[in-house]
Image (cartoon, rainbow, N blue to C red):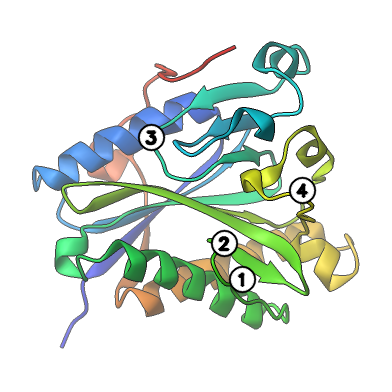
């Protein structure tokens, strides 16, 4: 029996605002059945802080205006969770999945996203796991991936951020995910070297795509926005500062 398709769209490096609008548009189209298949958007973002619905004022060490003065955009968004940070070298994934075709259970969905990332990391010889009572993926007590989602009529958007070869210094400007004393890490750091960073990026990307196909029972298929008759927009709704 042929499995359904997961259309994988690699956006390269993009501004957060335009990708946020793309996600919202794809979600609307998936709800309206204008798009036939689940989608996984992959992207690297320019430096940006996003504030989820659960963000506490104490989670930002610097105010938005000062972050922007340092070249870091700030967005308030509809996803769950607290504050997080994106930058180049971090693999960000936005699954646009119709959970009515999987399982209408948000707890199940979050655990499957975690499981897919844990599987991908295992393929990279990074042993990762969950932490009780928290969302995300951890390795040796350090956080390597953050997850924050939103669902509209059982169609998902927002998603995960996996630290791969990014610098991570700017995580010191906030309390990541609102968790006190959290230590962030990356695939490169856990592997012990930055040599071969480009190869590590592409092997991580491949492992993540394969794991999402496996855990959500879909055949990944690389495609493009153009093939879906879609385009980017430049409307950074939600930016503050």
* Label disc, if present, on residue 194 of the rendered structure: none
Can the viewer see residue 111?
Answer: yes
The x and y percentages for residue 100 are: 14, 63
Observer-nearest of 218 and 135: 135
Left or right: 165, with 9 as reference point: right
What residue sits right under mark 1 in the picture? 131
Q: Which of pointers 1 and 4 lies earlier in the amino acid sequence? A: 1
Q: Which residue is mark 4?
A: 166
Work out whether mark 1 precedes mark 2 in sequence or the reverse, and give the earlier one. 1
Q: Give the secondary structure at mark 4.
A: loop
The local secondary structure at tag 3 comes to: loop
Residue 47 seen in the current view: no
Question: Quick check: 29 left or right of 70?
Answer: left
Label located before the other in sequence (2 or 3): 3
Residue name at image x 57 percent, y 75 percent: 118
Residues tagged 1 and 2 counted as in contact (Cβ below 8 A): yes
- Tell me how far mark 1 sits from mark 2, CA to CA: 8 Å
Q: How far apart are the alpha carbons under marks 3 and 4?
A: 25 Å
Q: Is residue 211 above or below residue 241?
A: below
Q: How many residues crowd mark 2 within 10 Å: few (<14), some (14–19), many (20+)?
A: many
Comes first in the chain, label 4 or label 2: 2
Q: Residue at x 48, y 39 (%)?
A: 54
**Which quadrant of the rendered structure holds the N terminus?**
bottom left
Nearer the viewer's eye, disc 3 or disc 1?
1
Distance of mark 4 from mark 2, alpha carbons? 18 Å
Q: Residue at x 80, y 63 (%)?
A: 188
Would you identify the image quadrant in which residue 128 lies?
bottom right
Q: Position of residue 46 (x, y in %)?
A: 64, 31
- In the displayed structure, would residue 202 be above or below residue 115? above
Q: Which residue is mark 2?
A: 136
- Please name which of the two marks, 4 or 2, marks the residue nearer to the observer: 2
Q: Quadrant of the C terminus?
A: top right
């Amino acid at each position: 029996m042929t499995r359904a398709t997961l259309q994988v769209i690699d956006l390269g490096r993009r501004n957060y605002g335009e990708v946020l609008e793309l996600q919202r548009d794809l979600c609307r189209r998936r709800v309206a059945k204008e798009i036939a298949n689940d989608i996984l958007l992959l992207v690297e973002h320019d430096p940006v802080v996003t504030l989820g619905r659960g963000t506490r004022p104490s989670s930002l060490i610097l105010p938005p205006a000062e972050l922007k003065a340092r070249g870091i955009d700030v967005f308030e968004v509809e996803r769950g969770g607290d504050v997080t940070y994106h930058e180049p070298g971090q693999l960000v994934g936005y699954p646009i999945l119709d959970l009515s075709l999987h399982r209408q259970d948000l707890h199940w969905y979050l655990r499957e996203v975690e499981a897919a990332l844990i599987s991908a990391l295992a393929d990279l010889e990074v042993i990762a796991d969950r932490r009780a009572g928290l969302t995300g993926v951890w390795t040796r007590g350090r956080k390597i991936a953050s997850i924050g989602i939103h669902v509209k009529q059982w169609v998902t958007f927002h998603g995960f951020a996996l630290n791969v070869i990014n610098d991570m210094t700017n995580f010191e400007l906030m309390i990541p995910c609102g968790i006190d004393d959290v230590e962030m890490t990356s695939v490169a750091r856990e592997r012990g070297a930055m040599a071969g960073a480009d190869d590590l990026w592409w092997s991580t990307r491949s492992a993540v795509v394969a794991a999402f196909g496996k855990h959500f029972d879909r055949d990944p298929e690389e495609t493009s926005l153009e093939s879906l008759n879609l385009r980017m927009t430049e409307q950074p709704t939600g930016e503050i500062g």
